[in-house]
Image (cartoon, rainbow, N blue to C red):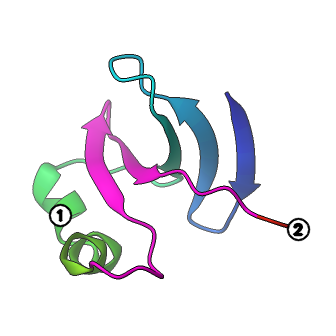
Amino acid sequence: MKQLGDGTYGNVWKAVNRQTNEVVAIKKMKRKFFSWDECMNLREVKSLRRLSHPHVVKLKEVIRENDELFFVFEFLVTVK
């Protein structure tokens, strides 16, 4: 839907899951990943898959497609 942020390692986008109509945040990593094992061995993936805490955004899914890596997170509304 729209870009939410741009960081050193990736860009974050607001999106809608077409199957469930759920609003999610998707982080697209900037570097290429050439194997699934390479993706699963990232510190970020290992940590987020284990964590379950009310102050940590929930990682819903990890997707690797065409050597690109995407993290699908729950979408949180920020209050300014």
Residue 43 in the image: above or below residue 71: below
Q: Residue drawn 45% across and 32% down? A: 22
Name the foreground residue: 46 vs 31. 46
- Quadrant in which residue 78 is drawn: bottom right
Mark 2 vs 1: CB contact within 8 A: no
* Magenta segment boundaries in residue numbering: 52-78
Say if the magenta span includes residue 60: yes
> Of marks 2 and 1, which one's residue comes earlier in the chain?
1
Numbered mark located on residue 17 in the image: none
Name the foreground residue: 32 vs 46. 46
Question: Which amino acid type is shown beneath numbered disc 1?
Answer: Met
Say if the magenta span includes residue 79: no
Q: Image check: 77 left or right of 17?
A: right
Q: Mark 2 points at which residue?
A: 80
Q: Image check: 57 left or right of 60?
A: right
Q: Image check: 73 left or right of 80?
A: left
- Quadrant in which residue 7 is drawn: bottom right
Measure how far apart labels 2 and 1 are at the Cα level. 34 Å
Q: Residue drawn 62% across and 42% down? A: 13
Residue 56 in picture, x, y percent from top left: 44, 77
Residue 33 in the image: above or below residue 9: above
Q: Residue drawn 62% across and 52% down? A: 11
Residue 23 in picture, x, y percent from top left: 52, 36
Q: Residue drawn 16% across and 49% down? A: 35
Q: Mark 1 points at which residue?
A: 40
Question: Which amino acid type is shown beneath numbered disc 2?
Answer: Lys
Residue 80 in the image: above or below residue 16: below
Q: Image check: 33 left or right of 21?
A: left
Residue 20 in picture, x, y percent from top left: 35, 23
Circle 1: is it few (<14), some (14-19), or many (20+) Cα within 10 Å?
Answer: few
